[in-house]
Image (spheres, rainbow, N blue to C red):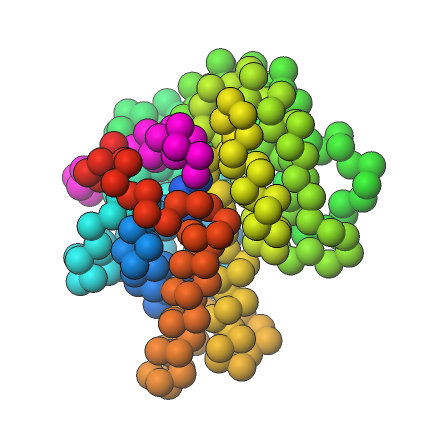
Amino acid sequence: MTTTERISVRAMCLKAMDNSFAAGSFSPRYLTNIGPVLQAAQNQNSPVIVQISQNELKRFGCSCDAFAKEYRRCKEELGIRVPAALHLDHTKDLGIIKEAVAAGFDSVMIDASEYELEQNISIVREAVAYAHRYGVEVEGEIGKISSNDRIETDSTSELYTDPYEASKFVDETDVDLLAISVGTVHGAYLARKPHIELKRIAEIRERVQLPLVLHGASGVPADLVNAAITLPGGGVSKINIATDLEQAFLKALGRGESTTNQGVEDIGQEELKQARQAVMLVAEDKMKHYLLSSGQASVLGKGGN
């Protein structure tokens, strides 16, 4: 069990909400892109969260331990001084959560949103009980965030998070952060324009005081994201970004399809340098124009706690 000091993602996001910005939770997907994300945060004097999901671990060929070790190596080698945290994104397996806790992750997400409310609560409560034992914070999800907009239509508001159910979920699980469904989707938008239901966020905020998390922000216009962050009374304060980073990486390499961590090892050093630079620039742009977090590291204090 790694004994590194944990960073409070909850405290980071609450301070972000109080100061009208959001903490970006970036998924580098490939180990080589952890450094560019951290460097972007340092360049922008922005807090940052680096994350990886259960599916990404499998798809790109990595483990929680390997990801955490590369994250810590990059932080030390680059001399990162801004508040930075390590997060396990969408995970359905308590075993993976235990691996992340042992590897030193600061927070984890247990996603049981596919189940009915009571079962979702039961599964999340078990994960919270385990993670909190080791000082690790937990993000839960209520509502359904689709993988891309193929299954979304203009009449799918039933997928959105119900404010009353959100309140019950938070009260009965003791989660630290709440991911909500308000119109965004994971992956690229294929058939319809990006949409964020701002009124729904405000209704949830009236009943939930925890940090609210927005998934599927890649491809959403900056003005929509800004509006979701700066809602009166507090909007979303943790925003996940993944697809935009990988697209920048692959475009710089002249590739159309994803690779793996092993595949990255076969890329020439000059090509890889340019691709990593592209990732860093996209992350910086998100911090400046989407998250409004550029220059905000100082409001969080040392370590973001």
At horizontal 32% and vertical 25% (from top left) the residue drawn is 132
The picture places residue 32, in percent across and down from the top left corner, at: 35, 67
Of residues 278 and 27, the one nearer the viewer is 278
> Toward which corner of the image does residue 262 lie, by quadrant?
bottom left
Of residues 13 and 86, the one nearer the viewer is 13
The picture places residue 264, in percent across and down from the top left corner, at: 40, 75
Q: Quadrant of the C terminus?
A: top left
Of residues 243 and 283, the one nearer the viewer is 283
Q: In the image, is 163 to the left or to the right of 124?
A: right
Residue 21 seen in this snapshot: yes
At horizontal 51% and vertical 73% (from top left) the residue drawn is 250
> Toward which corner of the image does residue 183 lie, by quadrant?
top right
Q: Is residue 65 above or below residue 85?
A: below
At horizontal 29% and vertical 43% (from top left) the residue drawn is 297
Q: Which residues are magenta?
A: 1-21
Q: Quadrant of the N terminus?
A: top left
Magenta highlight on residue 112: no
Q: In the image, is 207 to the left or to the right of 5?
A: right
Magenta highlight on residue 7: yes
The picture places residue 203, in percent across and down from the top left corner, at: 62, 21
